């Protein structure tokens, strides 16, 4: 997530944390050898509230674990076994990601506290150093495994916002997931740290990739925000995933804030750069389009290769654009091939796309949040697109006959006359349906889905359920299954 997005959403908080039964436990020594055989006790949905008050510290942040709609635990930096302590402005939960980092078959959890400072905090408003907490999932709940910061990448701490974005996936083909940490404030214009390659501990030394990395070799300035969004997908179908890194403030040619996305093949040490000026990508880079502000990978056409959705929330479709905080928004979708991701035949989706319907507004910022996953159980992925400026989420079904389609598209709507809810600021596809965050209202809407083949999303909006938390804590700011 970019710093500009954080500044729009995050507001002061005055609430306190209420303790609930914890899933966070110390793993007994005798259980170490048998934890693989035990049922995993983790969570169905993880909801972050990065501005919640903890122990009187404003904007310290919490993360809530749910089983179905039942609240199971609230985690914070004062929870048992989690390192550090809650401090004002830490933003614990600024980003969350789940994956199997230790290869034991249980889902693990990474939690970013991107505004954490080591040592003496600087005045309010300054970007943080950042830290990431890693928790292993076991039959006894989550077990703290350690913390990461930029020193694990061989760098000294600065206003890096380490942990502002997180992703997980098998980048080396060894069967377990690697952890990807976005570091958008790094001096070279941002970076991405990769942890757990080649069976290394996910809390050990990592690999840093920046635009200045020799085999990436891109022009850069300090404000590119490379690493503000990250996603993992196997775009060539060879069994080893590639890494997509968004730089939404990248200058494209002479256009500031046009934005770019870089596809990184870590094993081959190859990089591909995409922007709205790339051949095959519709439109052109314009000021503050923020191409790459959100990313989601999924196999939309069931060909065994992942495809990539790229959010462009600042895209202007009206005659007048009022600056970097505005945009009708759009989403570009590029499809995977045997040679990797290609812009040839790419699609552009907006509220003006035929079959979508509704009026496109220059405050919509469609594409601010994205999620991909198989909602209807037919083997191809659906795409959920957040439209927080108008309080909506657009859901497109994947098909085996051409990928995403507007046919039977679903538009979910938040509360009417409540634009401050920011419904659609976060979206996540879980094992049972779709979760939509409205952090301005402290609400998460969970929409179940059922099996249904073809061009149907499978969603059942009439069965939607509501999870509530503190609005001033931005409950629902980030989500992960």
Image (spheres, helix red, strand yellow):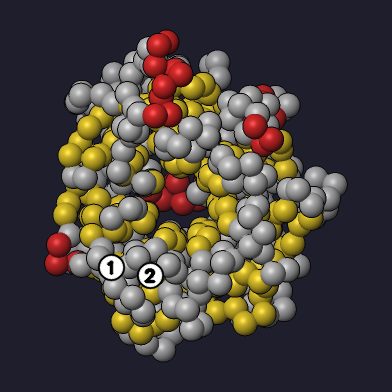
Q: Secondary structure at mark 2?
A: loop
In the rendered structure, the answer to whether residue 422 lies left or right of residue 274 reads: left
User: In the picture, residue 119 is in which quadrant?
Assistant: top right
User: In the picture, residue 239 is in which quadrant?
Assistant: bottom right
Comes first in the chain, label 1 or label 2: 2
Query: Quick check: can you spot residue 209?
Result: yes
Residue at figure coordinates x 53%, y 23% from the top left: 147
Residue at figure coordinates x 40%, y 11% from the top left: 30
Looking at the image, which residue sits at the far bottom?
A: 354
Q: Residues within 10 Å of mark 2 (few under 14, many from 20)?
A: some
Residue at figure coordinates x 72%, y 53% from the top left: 265
Q: Secondary structure at mark 1?
A: loop
Give the residue number, with chain letter if any, for mark 1. 451
Give the residue number, with chain letter if any, for mark 2. 378
202 or 367, nearer to the observer? 202
> Tags 1 and 2 in contact by the CB under 8 Å rule?
yes
């Amino acid at each position: 997530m970019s710093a500009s997005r954080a500044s729009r959403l995050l507001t002061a908080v005055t609430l306190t944390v209420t303790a609930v039964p914890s899933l966070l436990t110390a793993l007994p020594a005798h259980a170490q050898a048998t934890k693989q055989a035990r049922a995993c006790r983790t969570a169905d949905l993880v909801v972050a509230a990065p501005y919640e008050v903890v122990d009187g510290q404003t904007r310290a942040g919490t993360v809530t674990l749910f089983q179905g709609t039942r609240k199971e635990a609230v985690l914070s930096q004062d929870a048992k076994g989690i390192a550090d302590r809650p401090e004002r402005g830490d933003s614990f939960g600024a980003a969350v990601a789940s994956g199997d980092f230790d290869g034991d078959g249980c889902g693990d959890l990474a939690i970013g506290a991107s505004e954490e400072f080591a040592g003496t905090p600087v005045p309010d408003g300054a970007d943080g150093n950042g830290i990431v907490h890693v928790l292993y999932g076991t039959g006894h709940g989550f077990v703290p495994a350690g913390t990461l910061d930029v020193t694990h990448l061989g760098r000294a701490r600065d206003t890096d916002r380490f942990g502002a974005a997180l992703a997980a996936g098998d980048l080396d083909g060894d069967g377990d997931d690697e952890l990807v940490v976005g570091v958008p404030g790094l001096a070279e214009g941002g970076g991405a740290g990769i942890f757990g390659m080649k069976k290394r501990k996910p809390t050990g030394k990592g690999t840093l990739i920046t635009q200045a990395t020799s085999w990436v070799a891109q022009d850069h300035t300090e404000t590119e925000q490379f690493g503000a969004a990250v996603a993992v997908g196997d775009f060539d179908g060879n069994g080893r995933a590639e890494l997509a890194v968004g730089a939404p403030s990248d200058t494209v040619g002479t256009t500031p804030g046009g934005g770019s996305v870089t596809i990184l093949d870590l094993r081959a040490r190859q990089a591909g750069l995409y922007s709205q000026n790339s051949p095959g990508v519709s439109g052109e880079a314009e000021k503050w389009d923020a191409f790459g502000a959100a990313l989601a990978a999924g196999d939309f056409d069931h060909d065994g290769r992942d495809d990539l959705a790229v959010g462009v929330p600042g895209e202007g479709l009206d005659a007048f654009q009022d600056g970097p905080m505005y945009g009708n928004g759009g989403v570009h979708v590029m499809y995977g091939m045997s040679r990797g991701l290609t812009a040839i035949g790419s699609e552009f989706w907006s509220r003006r796309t035929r079959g979508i319907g509704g009026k496109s507004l220059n405050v919509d910022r469609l594409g601010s949040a994205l999620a991909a996953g198989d909602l209807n159980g037919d083997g191809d992925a659906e795409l959920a697109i957040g439209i927080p400026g108008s309080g909506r989420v657009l859901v497109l079904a994947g098909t085996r006959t051409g990928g995403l389609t507007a046919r039977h598209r679903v538009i979910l709507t938040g509360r009417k006359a409540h634009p401050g809810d920011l419904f659609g600021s976060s979206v996540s596809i879980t094992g049972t349906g779709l979760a939509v965050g409205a952090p301005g209202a402290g609400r998460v809407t969970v929409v179940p889905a059922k099996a249904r083949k073809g061009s149907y999303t499978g969603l059942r909006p009439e069965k939607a359920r509501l999870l509530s938390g503190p609005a001033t804590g931005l409950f629902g700011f980030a989500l992960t299954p």
